[in-house]
Amino acid sequence: MNKLELQQTAVEVRKGIIEGVHAAKAGHPGGSLSAADIFTYLYFEEMRIDPKNPKDPDRDRFVLSKGHTAPGLYSALALRGYFPREDLLTLRHTGSYLQGHPDMKHIPGVDMSSGSLGQGLSAACGMALGGKLSGKSYRVYALCGDGEIQEGQIWEAAMFAGFRRLDNLCVIVDNNNLQIDGPIDKVCSPYPIDKKFEAFNFHVINIDGNDFDELRAAFDEAKGVKGMPTAIIAHTVKGKGVSFMENAVGWHGKAPNDEEYASAMEELGKAGEALCQK
């Protein structure tokens, strides 16, 4: 896809996030929206995947370590063709396979169940090491939250990845600077994030995670790195794309009411129309 197509797709991913969380009357829109461009680039440009064969042993893998932003992942998966888009409206409903956190046993395209913060990167390291030991060429991508990396297990996994020189592993940190209780640098600062990953023998790239040109350059650079894993520190805006949700910590984990839903969808609709004019 070119940049314009990616931007248009990202608007649709954001619409799916708002639709799903509104229908559920619960969920986490803020971090889903900040990572929407990352989900879009991974699933529509970067990863070697086939929705018709979601268990292909040679596919690239993705682990959503910050599993509460499942609405963003589900929206990207639906648009990519893993399951019907209308199923997004069943998010968190009793009997729905689209649970509040990713479930690899029931959701096509989900490579790892996640939600207990801090654990996803360990699973991604295991997948990457497995690929190395079995001589597979697939790559493994893990998306972590910047609040999540306050968890100690993240750094145990990082130490393992660096020591094992897992150059088929790419960690993305969604650095939107807000977690459930407020700004991360006020709760328990993980800064400087880039220097910490460098200390664990990672190749580190800092980017604007809401800019497709920078996302493309970063992922292309990561694929060329040999002998060490890569960490992409993606500086993003929490709630990106819905103006009244942007940089507002209150939207970390609540659903829009009917009026807020209509306003958000109108804004996203106008954004999509503006892109169609280009």
Image: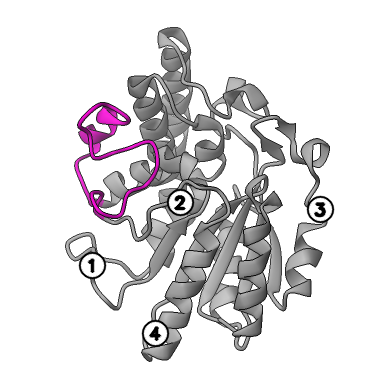
The crowding category of the residue bearing disc 4, from other C-alpha atoms within 10 Å (few below 14, some 14 to 19, many at least 20), is: few
**Residue 47 locus on image (x, y percent):** 39, 67
Secondary structure beneath dot 2 equals: helix
Q: Badges 3 and 2: C-beta atoms under 8 Å apart?
A: no
Stretch in magenta:
81-108
**Residue 271 locus on image (x, y percent):** 48, 30
Q: CA distance from mark 2 to mark 1?
A: 19 Å
Vertical comparison of 111 with 255: above or below? below
The crowding category of the residue bearing disc 2, from other C-alpha atoms within 10 Å (few below 14, some 14 to 19, many at least 20), is: many
Amino acid bearing label 1: Lys
Q: CA distance from mark 3 to mark 1?
A: 37 Å
Give the left or right position of residue 98, taking residue 69 as reference.
left
Question: What residue is disc 1 on?
Answer: 55
Mark 3 or 4, which is nearer the eye?
3
Vertical comparison of 198 with 113: above or below? below
Q: CA distance from mark 2 to mark 4?
A: 21 Å
In this view of the protein, can residue 234 be seen by the observer? yes
Q: CA distance from mark 3 to mark 4?
A: 33 Å
Amino acid bearing label 3: Tyr
